Every structure is written in structure tokens, then in C-alpha cells.
Amino acid sequence: MRRPSRKLSPDEAEVWARVARTVAPLEKRKPIPVVPTAPAERSGISSPPIPTPKKVKGRVPPPLPPKPQPARPKGETQLHLDGSWEKRIAKGTLVPDFSLDLHGSTLDSAYHRLMHGLGQAKAMGARVVLVVTGKPRPVDAMDRGERRGAIRAKINDWLAASEHASDIVAIRGAHRRHGGQGAIYVVLKRRR
């Protein structure tokens, strides 16, 4: 609810006029006429009303251009591996070079284990890292820190924002023999 505006006293109007003279306007407008106050008016005699500025109708600025999208995580459907990779994943014949089991960990410990484990896998020259996360669960954003499925819900974000993001070629859901919905394959670039 808006409070009704009050008029400035003569002393306030004089101070305001001094302040207004020190400010450069943003756009060209007619200056508001300031009525000088006489000493007699300061003693309590009412002064003429000060005109209020008119509302200026202007052009509505054009909408801002859309922000460039940050690099998205290389999710399960975003990058295409060649056909031989996809067949090996579908048949369950892909053999991981390195495994990380994060299932049952807290979010903090899972994150640290994931980052440390990917560093180890890269140092060993591993191409395929099996990461066991636990099955995804429909959880509210507010509950992801404590409920089941929290690690699975966070892992793509962790990988995309990590120091290892540039070394990840693809992320795919694991075959049943390696954990199915409760695990993922992280395919890393070949080390040269």
C-alpha cells in the first residue's frame, strides 16, 4: 500500500533545489522551476505549491539478448560415441578400466572420492570409468542432500563443473551387469 505523499516544507524545498542543481540528468527534461523562498515564508507563511514533475513516457527498451549457455555436461544423450562403443555398452561387453563406488556415501565424501578417483584413473591411462552411484530416485530439489538418489542427481553437474570436464568424452548409463540404473560409464579421452 502506498503512503500519500507530503509536500516539502520551504526549508526542505530550498535544500532539495540546491541538491538538484548538483546532479546531471539522465535524459533531457525541462528543469523543474524552483520557487525561491523569502524569509517571511520561513516563519510559517505558506508557500505556493511546487509543481510535480510530469511522468515521461518513453520507449520500452528492447529485451536483452539471451545469455550464452554455459558448457553443458556431456550427458547420456548429448555426445555420440562410434557404433562399436554403443554396441559394447548395449551388449554388456564393455569392460571398465577403473571403478568407483560412491553408493552409500554422503554428498561431500562422494564428491571428493569422485574427483580423486577420476584423477587416479587419468593417471593410470584409463578410458572407461565405472561409477556406481545408486539408483536415481524422484527427489525434490530441497531434499537432494539427504534422500536416496542424491548422488545420482548431482553427478552430471559435478562432472560438468569439475577440473576433469575437458577430459570427459561421454557419460552413458551402465549395463545391467555393471549396475544398470545405479551406475554410469564415464568415457575419458585417450591419453597421449
Image (cartoon, grey):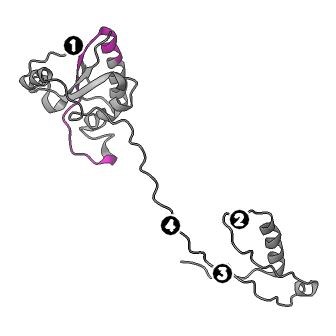
Residue 102 visible somewhere in the drawing = no
Residue at image mark 4: 60
| Secondary structure category for the residue under label 2 | loop
| Secondary structure category for the residue under label 3 | loop
Check residue 100 for magenta coloring. no
Magenta residues (range): 119-142
Q: CA distance from mark 3 to mark 1?
A: 74 Å
Mark 1: amino acid = Asp
- As displayed, is residue 98 above or below residue 44? above
Number of dots carrying numbers: 4
Residue at image mark 3: 5
Please tell me which of labels 1 and 4 falls first in the chain: 4
Q: Quadrant of residue 187?
A: top left
Mark 2: amino acid = Pro
Residue at image mark 2: 25
- As displayed, is residue 143 above or below residue 28? above
Q: CA distance from mark 3 to mark 4?
A: 27 Å
| Secondary structure category for the residue under label 4 | loop
**Disc 1 to disc 4: CB gap under 8 Å:** no
Mark 3: amino acid = Ser
Nearest to viewer (mark 3 / mark 2): 2
For the point 72% across and 82% down, the residue is 7
Q: Nearer the viewer, residue 86 or 82?
A: 82
Residue at image mark 1: 97
Mark 4: amino acid = Val
Q: Position of residue 110 (x, y in %)?
A: 32, 27
Q: CA distance from mark 1 to mark 4?
A: 58 Å
